[in-house]
């Protein structure tokens, strides 16, 4: 557990970057610090491992004041990932990852064996081990940065805008990978970003900072979208927050009947659209009624691409609504297991479910 | 021209070449050892930097002849003691190296220094294991200039009776043997080229990372 107690950072030029911050970061969770530039989120993060020292208040890690003891020694126990990976240019990828174990006095062989293990965990090809950082792409370098931070298996991971310098596609895969890793490792992660979508996606809890180093709201992402504390948070959270907030609600939805056919068979049923599925009853696309009405077989040319799919096992109301809205027939395709069609959802069902979820919350 | 002088004096030339080499290279090594901590000090604060870089830079403007003549008085040594020349050339080496090593240390990306700090390097260990290795390419460039400069400056010592191959200049001039003077010039030149090439090769060998990276950013 990391506790900020009345923590203030005033720089020598008089700027107050963080002003009397009180905040507790829970163990085993991803806590995201988010806010516009100059809000003190990065300063707050860097005070945890004393890269910046607070000028007032105390920071406790598991009850111990971080200012007691040697800074370098303390930092070896906290993983740190930064924006431009910050790899050591003169060390091979393997030795970069082995940095902290080596500092801790592990033997070279043991440190390198551990580094090789981590390359596999973060998805780096073994042949990159002997390359130098400048031979890797930005996304790969960032994976090395994550592997390096995890090498000595620290309980705490500090991540300072780690994915903001890579392109959006790579960023999304790195985010997914982080969530997958975290599900296995259960580290206490403090993550700084200026991107509210990233914050909402990754955070178990999100701390929204406003200029001058004040905490505007500290809440679960779903609550942040549903009930912003004030106009600042509302403005920062941005457009479509009602729709995005559906991503944090899951509710049982009634599944409708769906008439299906397969390629080579005639379209059946009374609706205007028929869903075409393959042998394993996975959706292939939609077929409009007039194309199969005369009893001729449905062919690939008749297929209209389907919308997004609603996975009933992990799906949120957001994915259900999106499935309904993006489907040409207006019926969202609900799938389960290996992508097998189990029924349909409609936008009306989603809105009805939302209304009943709200009623339950109000009653509780 | 009396080219016959050369084959008759090969032994002397070889002896002077060896003397010349260590008179030039020992100060290079000493100068490097002194310059690294001074350069480190120079990167601590802007004040230290301007004082150290200016002061060491000024040393280079002291005329070599004056320095070699004055050092025995300052150090209390015999005028023919080779130590005088070693000290003088060490001073010139420091004059050249402090600025280039300080520049090299300044050029180490701050993000790398910050990352090393965050990993838990102590400042001393970080300097030895991260900052200094990354300063090698620029340091080697400075060393090459100092090495060539030393090779030629050693000859000035001949005025006071020590100076390796420089003795061929004074002797050849006094006895009017142009072949002796030309031999001196050519051997000094060749020595300088050899040392320069050696430093270049060693510098490349110990910085394998500096030769990679053409493919950076193309692979995922």
Image (cartoon, coloured by chain):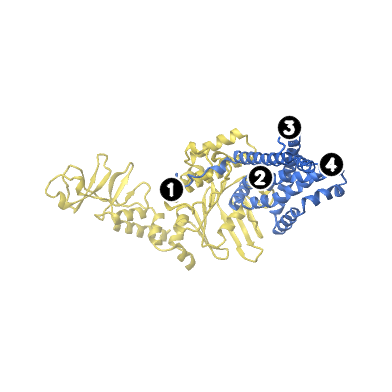
Which residue is painted at 33% across and 55% down in the image? A322
Which quadrant would the C terminus of chain B be assigned to in this image? Answer: top left
> Is A247 positioned to the left or the right of A193 in the image?
left
Q: Which residue is mark 3?
A: B10
SS label for mark 2: helix
Which quadrant would the N terminus of chain B be assigned to in this image? Answer: top right
Foreground pick, A235 / A36: A36
Q: Chain of mark 3?
A: B
The CA span between labels 1 and 3 is 72 Å
In the rendering, at what x and y percent does residue B12 appear? 76, 33
Q: Which residue is mark 2?
A: B144
SS label for mark 1: helix
The answer as to whether the residues below labels 1 and 3 share one chain is no
Q: Is residue B199 above or below residue A55?
A: above
Foreground pick, B18 / A2: B18
The CA span between labels 2 and 4 is 26 Å
* Residue A230 in view (yes/no): no
Q: Chain of mark 1?
A: A
The answer as to whether the residues below labels 2 and 4 share one chain is yes
Foreground pick, A140 / A212: A140
Q: Nearer the viewer, mark 1 or mark 4?
A: 4
Q: Are marks 2 and 4 in contact (CB under 8 Å)?
A: no
Q: Earlier in the sequence, mark 3 or mark 2?
A: 3
Q: Which residue is mark 4?
A: B81
The tag on residue A173 is: 1
Q: Is residue A141 above or below residue A126?
A: below
Chain B drawing hue: blue
Chain A drawing hue: yellow
């Amino acid at each position: 557990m990391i506790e900020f107690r009345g923590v203030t950072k005033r720089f020598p030029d008089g700027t107050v970057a963080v002003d009397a911050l009180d905040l507790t970061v829970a163990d085993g969770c991803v806590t995201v610090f988010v806010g516009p530039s100059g809000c003190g989120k990065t300063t707050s993060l860097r005070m945890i491992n004393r890269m910046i020292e607070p000028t007032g208040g105390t920071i406790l890690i598991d009850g111990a004041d971080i200012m007691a003891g040697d800074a370098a020694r303390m930092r070896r126990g906290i993983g740190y990932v930064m924006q431009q990976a910050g790899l050591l240019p003169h060390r091979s990828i393997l030795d970069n990852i082995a940095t902290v174990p080596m500092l801790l006095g592990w033997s070279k062989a043991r440190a390198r064996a551990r580094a090789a293990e981590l390359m596999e965990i973060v998805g780096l090809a073994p042949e990159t081990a002997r390359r130098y950082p400048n031979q890797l792409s930005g996304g790969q370098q960032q994976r090395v940065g994550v592997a390096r931070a995890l090498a000595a298996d620290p309980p705490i991971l500090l991540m300072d805008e780690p994915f903001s310098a890579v392109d959006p596609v790579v960023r999304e895969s790195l985010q997914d990978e982080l969530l997958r890793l975290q599900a296995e490792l259960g580290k206490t992660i403090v993550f700084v970003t200026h991107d509210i979508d990233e914050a909402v996606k990754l955070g178990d809890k999100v701390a929204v900072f406003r200029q001058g180093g004040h905490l505007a709201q500290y809440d679960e992402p779903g609550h942040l979208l549903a009930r912003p504390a004030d106009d600042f948070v509302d403005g920062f959270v941005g457009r479509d927050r009602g729709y995005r907030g559906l991503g944090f609600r899951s509710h049982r939805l009634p599944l409708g009947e769906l008439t299906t056919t397969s390629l080579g068979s005639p379209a059946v049923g009374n609706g205007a659209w028929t869903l075409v599925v393959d042998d394993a009853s996975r959706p292939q696309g939609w077929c409009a009624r007039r194309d199969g009405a005369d009893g001729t077989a449905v062919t690939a040319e008749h297929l209209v691409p389907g919308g997004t799919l609603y996975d009933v096992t992990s799906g949120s109301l957001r994915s259900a609504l999106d499935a309904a809205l993006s489907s040409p027939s207006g019926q969202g395709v609900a799938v389960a297991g290996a992508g097998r069609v189990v029924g349909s959802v409609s936008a009306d069902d989603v809105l009805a479910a939302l209304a009943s979820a709200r009623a339950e919350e109000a009653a509780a | 021209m009396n080219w016959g002088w050369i084959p008759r004096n090969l032994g002397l030339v070889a002896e002077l070449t060896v003397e010349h080499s260590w008179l030039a290279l020992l100060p290079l090594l000493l100068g490097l050892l002194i310059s690294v901590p001074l350069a480190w000090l120079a990167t601590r604060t802007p004040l230290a930097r301007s004082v150290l870089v200016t002061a060491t830079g000024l040393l280079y403007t002291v005329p070599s002849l004056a320095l070699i003549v004055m050092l025995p008085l300052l150090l209390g040594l015999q005028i023919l003691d080779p130590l005088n020349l070693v000290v003088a050339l060490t001073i010139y080496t420091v004059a050249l190296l402090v600025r280039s090593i300080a520049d090299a240390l300044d050029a180490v990306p701050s993000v790398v220094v910050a990352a090393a700090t965050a990993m838990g390097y102590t400042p001393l260990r970080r300097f030895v294991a991260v900052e200094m290795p990354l300063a090698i390419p620029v340091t080697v460039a400075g060393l090459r200039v100092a090495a060539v400069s030393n090779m030629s400056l050693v000859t000035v010592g001949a005025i006071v009776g020590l100076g390796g191959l420089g003795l061929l200049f004074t002797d050849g001039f006094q006895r009017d043997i142009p072949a002796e003077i030309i031999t001196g010039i050519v051997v000094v030149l060749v020595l300088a080229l050899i040392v320069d090439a050696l430093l270049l090769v060693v510098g490349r060998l110990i910085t394998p990372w500096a030769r990679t990276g053409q493919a950076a950013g193309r692979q995922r």
